[in-house]
Image (cartoon, rainbow, N blue to C red):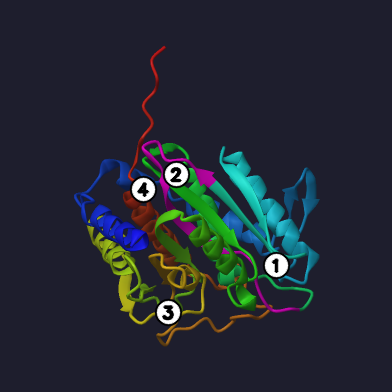
Amino acid sequence: MKRFLLIVLIFITIQSVNFGQSPVIQNIINQTNLDSLTHFVRELSGEVSTIIGGSPYTIVSRNKNNASNNMAANYIKQKLDSYGLVTYDQWWSGTGRNVYGVQLGSQYPNKKYIICAHYDDMPSGATAPGADDNASGTAAVLEAARIFTQYDSKYTIIYALWDEEEQGLVGSAYYAQQAALAGDSIMGVINMDMTAWDNDNDSVGEIHVRNYANSNALKDLMIQVNTTYSIGITPVVENPGTTASDHASFWNNGYGAILLIEEYYGGDFNAYYHSVNDKIQYYNQPYYHKMSKLAYGTVATLAQLTDIVPVEM
């Protein structure tokens, strides 16, 4: 009964969001920086070296069996720390490690929205750039943290990067199960997985949803954000959506969630999926920029971001 009442309250909360254009949300969307996004991707995919723990390092793979994957997790944590977030490692095995940062809500700290992506990748050889799958989503979450932490959020925002998605959603399943056991009030989850391939340049972004909790309300809001702020994605709703990415872990535990992804059910699937050629050179960068803006506008609207008001002394 408590879980049913929570779902009803979440649905009412989303339905009560004012869909008129907000100058704050527009400004957040405008701050989405393609150079910043692609810089994160180049570092995560090993195209360029980065600095991790004070030393130069090249992330050659983010496969669970490669030591470089743990360095990628260190990189992610370092970035989230730099934005002033309270960060956490969530281990569940010798190699499995989720990393997430928390921006505490100013009015509703116990009610949480999650923007997330998996950071691990394939193939299992010595080199696995994983630029689209899923440095694209990982970089987008990091860029969201960079922008959103400049604002006050009424609701808590969790910036989550999951490990071992490629082995069966292992990391997100562990997190969602623990959250459900603790009775966490997760108001909605926006999952980003493969958001940079658009070979036919039709700007299609698939929104995967199923009839769990408030998932359809999240989908409806994302579509309205796309229209209200003229983002330029052509949304295609997939219901029933795929269960092959981390949003499904939240469906399985009674939470509302949606997946934003390039054409997965459609005909324009990434030709370099799970290969050593999944590189940033094959990105449609304007499309990636728009997909990130769509996610940010949605989460910023849900969490009700506002300008930080200086405190008078």
Q: CA distance from mark 1 to mark 2?
A: 26 Å
Residue 79 x, y percent position in the rendering: 62, 47
Q: Separation of disc 2 and disc 3 at Cα?
A: 27 Å
Q: Nearer the viewer, mark 4 or mark 3?
A: 4
Query: Residue at position x 46%, y 44% from top?
Result: 147
**Does the magenta-highlighted stretch encompass residue 38?**
no
Residue beneath disc 1:
62
Magenta segment = 102-124
- In the figure, is residue 274 to the left or right of 202? right
Q: Which circle's residue, 1 or 2, is located before the other in the chain? A: 1
Which image quarter is the C terminus in?
top left
Residue under numbered circle 3:
263
Q: Nearer the viewer, residue 113 or 260?
A: 113
Residue found at x 67% / y 70%: 129
Reading the image, the residue beneath label 4 is: 303
Residue bearing the label numbered 2: 148
Most extreme residue toward the front, as rendered?
1
Name the outermost residue toward the bottom: 267
Mark before the other along the chain sequence, 2 or 4: 2
> Can I make out residue 74 in this image?
yes
